[in-house]
Amino acid sequence: MVGSDDRGLVAITGANGTIGYASTALVLQQGYSVRCVVRTGDAINTLQSGPSLQEFASRIEYAIVPDNTVAGAYDSALEGARYVIHVAGVWPTPADKHPDNDIYLPFVKSMENILAAAKKSGTVRRIVFTQAGAAMVHPDEGDRYGTAMDEALNESTPVQSGLLSITPPLISPHHAYCAAKAQCMVRLKELRASGTAPFSIVQIVPGTVMGPSELVSTKSRARKKMDRMARAILFNEPKPRYLFGFVHVEDCARVHVEALDEAKVAEKDLPDWFIAAASSDKAKNGDQVWKEAGDLIIRTFKEEVANGMFIVGRDNKPINMPYYADSTLTETLLLSGDRIRGLNECITEVAAWYKDLAE
């Protein structure tokens, strides 16, 4: 399927998800071919309905991997691929998820299976892994991190070392998520440092991913699919527990896709992980950041606030906001110096999107 003018085949796991779909659209626009790796046939139907993908239908393949914890799960999905973007994962909610079987093992086993399949393929040259800021906090600390935003989250921020010894049986979904992410990040960092992998490894830590979705056409669906931060601001829904910065979905996808470019960033120049979150104003704490966004919505959408469409959670900030994001290196190496959009820009766009659907 790959033509002479094609930049290569990219296998994207979780291609029907927020980051995965935006990355799929962007790699196609940039001249790659794509193999969308999903869990079900319904996910394929969803992708085929995406307006941004339809014009590139001839450069899209699909692969179904119903259980990514099974040995060899990704072998056929990665066959012939030049690049991989591994986004697929599981969120540690709802509470009825089993910490070991539904959260920890899928993260750890899927990473192992991706590495094994990439090596077996003989064609994969670079893998981009989506990680999480949850690896930098310890669940046993509870909600004592505060909202000072006075610690740096950058390419040198280490994972919480205490997470590396937390293994099944795990006591909560939160423990499972934090431990799995931390252990995967350290495993990949050590593998890269060993120089034994036949491909280069990139790790990306996104902030909260915000932005509209062209796959959503109703306001009820939009509210359900909207990120937790946006719902907390626009509808005063229960406050999120943790925040590690903000990133527009298109900017997050761009970080993932530009990271594929071996000419742009050689393996020797890769950091431990890129931060895909708008750089914070270090002079502001969590209270100030949140109230500023709430005030912006109140000013910009006066009528919608007055008629109850938006019930602004101006003081409904996340419980834990320990880090200020520093994406300077990410913007310099991957985005040609372009700035990642932050909370105010993202929440305004999300609100306008929801308003349009509601009308």
Image (tube, helix red, strand yellow):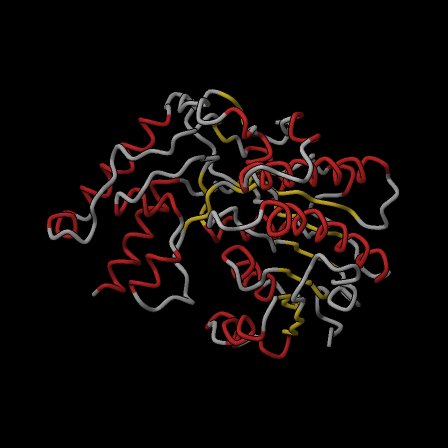
In this view of the protein, which residue sits in the foreground, 106 or 250?
106
Q: Is residue 358 above or below residue 108?
A: below
Question: Residue 180 location, x and y as percent?
Answer: 65, 41
Quarter occupied by residue 157: top right
Quarter occupied by residue 10: bottom right
Q: Quadrant of the C terminus?
A: bottom left
Q: Quadrant of the N terminus?
A: bottom right
**Is residue 206 left or right of 345 when viewed as pictured?**
right
Question: Residue 205 location, x and y as percent?
Answer: 58, 40
In this view of the protein, which residue sits in the foreground, 199 or 64?
64
Q: Number of numbered discs present?
A: 0
Question: Residue 160 location, x and y as percent?
Answer: 63, 27
Q: Residue at the spot x=61%, y=66% of the render?
A: 38
Q: Is residue 357 above or below residue 249?
A: below
Q: Residue at the spot x=29%, y=35% of the render?
A: 316
**Is residue 322 left or right of 194 when viewed as pictured?**
left
Q: Residue at the spot x=34%, y=69% of the render?
A: 217
Q: Is residue 27 above or below residue 153?
A: below
Quarter occupied by residue 5: bottom right
In this view of the protein, which residue sits in the foreground, 79 or 239?
239
In this view of the protein, which residue sits in the foreground, 240 or 124?
240
**Is residue 327 left or right of 65 when viewed as pictured?**
left
Q: Residue at the spot x=21%, y=49% of the render?
A: 310
